[in-house]
Image: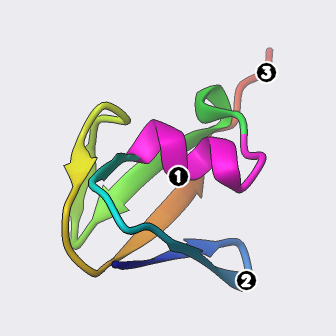
Amino acid sequence: MRIEVEHGDEVLVVESEEAITISEVLERLSIAPSTVLAVLGQTIVPHTSVISEDIRLELVVVSSGG
């Protein structure tokens, strides 16, 4: 399956033969899970969500500061 990931101005692609979690997708892309929210459509989805078909995710960078 093909997972397209919108991150900033880039669209990154992860291919997987088997079901994969969003955390595993982030790991393959070397993106720290604590720095982003995963959005599918207009819904924030947990990083534990399992992907089993072609999808397009958007990553929203989480900002923090004082």
Q: Main secondary structure of the magenta part?
A: helix
Q: Mark 1 is on which residue type?
A: Val
Q: CA distance from mark 3 to mark 1?
A: 27 Å
- Pointer 2 or 3: first along the chain: 2
Q: Mark 2 is on which residue type?
A: Glu
| Membership of 28 in magenta stretch | yes
Q: Image height check: is 7 above or below 28?
A: below
Crowd tier of the residue under label 1, counting other residues whose Cα lies within 10 Å: few below 14, some 14–19, many 20 or above: many
- What SS does tag 3 mark? loop
Query: Who is closer to the viewer here, 7 or 54?
Result: 54
Residue at 24 percent across and 41 percent down: it is 49
Q: How many marks do you count on the picture?
A: 3
Q: Quadrant of residue 40?
A: bottom left
Residue at 71 percent across and 25 percent down: it is 64
**According to the image, label 2 marks what residue?**
10
**According to the image, label 3 marks what residue?**
65
Residue at 34 percent across and 59 percent down: it is 39
Q: CA distance from mark 2 to mark 1?
A: 15 Å
Query: Range of the magenta residues?
Result: 22-31
**According to the image, label 1 marks what residue?**
25
